[in-house]
Image: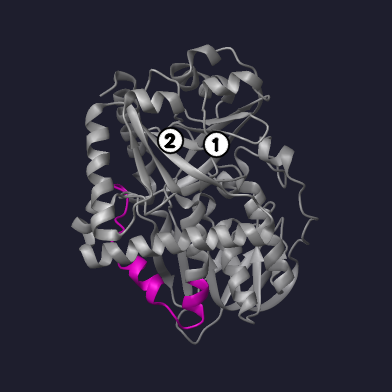
Amino acid sequence: MNLLFSNDRRGEYPPSLYAAQVAPLDPFPRQSGEIRAEICVVGGGYTGLSAALHLARAGRDVVLLEAHRVGFGASGRNGGQLGSGQRLENDELERIAGRDTARRLWQMAEDAKRLTRDLATEAGVTVHDGVAHAFRKAAELDEAQRHIEHLARHYGYDRIESFDTAAFRKILPSDAYCGGVIDHGAGHLNPLALALGIARLAAEAGARIHEMSHVHQIAFARDAASKTVVQTETGRVTCDQVILAGNGYLGDVSGAVAARVMPINNFVVATEPLGDLASKVLSRNIAVHDTKFVVNYWRLDAEKRLIFGGGENVSYHFPNDIAAKVRKPLSQIYPELAEVPFSHAWGGTLAITMNRLPCFMRPAPNALSASGFSGHGVALATLAGRQMADAVSGNSSDFDLMAGLPSPAFPGGQLLRWPLLVAGMSWFALRDRLGI
């Protein structure tokens, strides 16, 4: 099944609040005929756009192909949270890779935040500071305190503030949580505005961007001296290097990547401006996510609209009533908002890996791929684009570090990974509902 066309209209942004608030760029032309390029980037989200931008600014001849519009996928419809660190906590990274490598991964993630903030500033996109992690159990708060102390002692990061139940409820007035922390070094933004901003910067730098250009086949180079041919519906691109940046929408273009990266769906709603009712949601201009396996995440925008994501889905298709899917977890956190009307409801496809670390790999000669950011991609995906641009230009140290991390295939491989994931997600969703 091709997720590029399963849930959305061809060439149209989803009916999100972001799409309603951000003026789209003028369409980029469809790729047609024979094109020659040094580098071909497949995918117009954060990863691909960042790669194209950095390659173009380095004077390289780069073509980017996007099946819909730039920022169409997860990059333009996510929760807009700019998080710190990698997807795994540092102590777990230390167990996997050792403390020295964990420190490099932490610094890499800090670099990702700086890069994303710098690009947002350049593109005129506002980034607001502060992301809270809301805990359902006292043990989670205790573990978070140990993590805060560990980061301060071993990584020099002291921007996370802890709150007990009473103090946290003054910030997030809900009985669903027993406390929380706020990472003042993290942030939140309009994700589609960021994607379109990077696209504009890339085009201005000389990247050749083509929308409505679905890549359905790639003839990868046989060896380092061969060319790669990227086939679209209306033509093809012959290139020296190819960068795969399709994430959850990559499909079966590369079986090696597909075996390790699983697309899943997530859903978001937005309300009309809440007015005085907004104070019953959050008393600070921060974003929030909680500790459920099927995570809930939310924030208020500048107009005091609540943007809330949550609800699991065990099908490649979006549910018929996305609003009803998300209303249930929202009403469990904020019962007084159980009947609040939604102005927008949309779904999106992200990608996860078995161990929740991004999957960096070289699937063929002169081919680079980075995907599977597991819900932590606003900063890391943007950095991944630069890392692949650097690798193409001869500086592959960061890419090679990421590619050296474990990236196990899903059980059953590409064929059976989906039914096995459905079973696993159903189990963890049940644990969420039981409060385990």
Labels 2 and 1 touching (C-beta < 8 A): no
- Checking the image for residue 289, the label placed there is 2
Residue ID at (66%, 22%): 275
The answer to whether residue 393 is magenta is yes
Residue 91 seen from this side: yes
Magenta highlight range? 388-412
Could you tell me which secondary element the residue under label 2 belongs to?
strand
- Checking the image for residue 285, the label placed there is 1
Percent x, y for residue 35?
A: 71, 75
Nearest the camera: 189 or 398? 189
**Separation of marks 2 and 1 at Cα, in angstroms:** 14 Å
Nearest the camera: 31 or 373? 373
**Label 1 Cα neighbours within 10 Å, binned few <14 / some 14-19 / many ≥20:** some
Percent x, y for residue 11?
A: 72, 47
For the C terminus, the quadrant is top left
Residue ID at (28%, 54%): 152
Direction from residue 27 to residue 117 in the image, left or right: left
Residue ID at (72%, 67%): 203
Residue 198 seen from this side: no
Nearest the camera: 192 or 14? 192
Query: What is the three-letter code of the residue carrying label 1?
Result: Asn
In the depicted structure, whether residue 433 falls above or below residue 214: above
In the depicted structure, whether residue 434 falls above or below residue 383: above
Percent x, y for residue 52?
A: 61, 69
Residue 86 found in image quarter: bottom left
Query: What is the three-letter code of the residue carrying label 2?
Result: His
**Label 2 Cα neighbours within 10 Å, binned few <14 / some 14-19 / many ≥20:** many
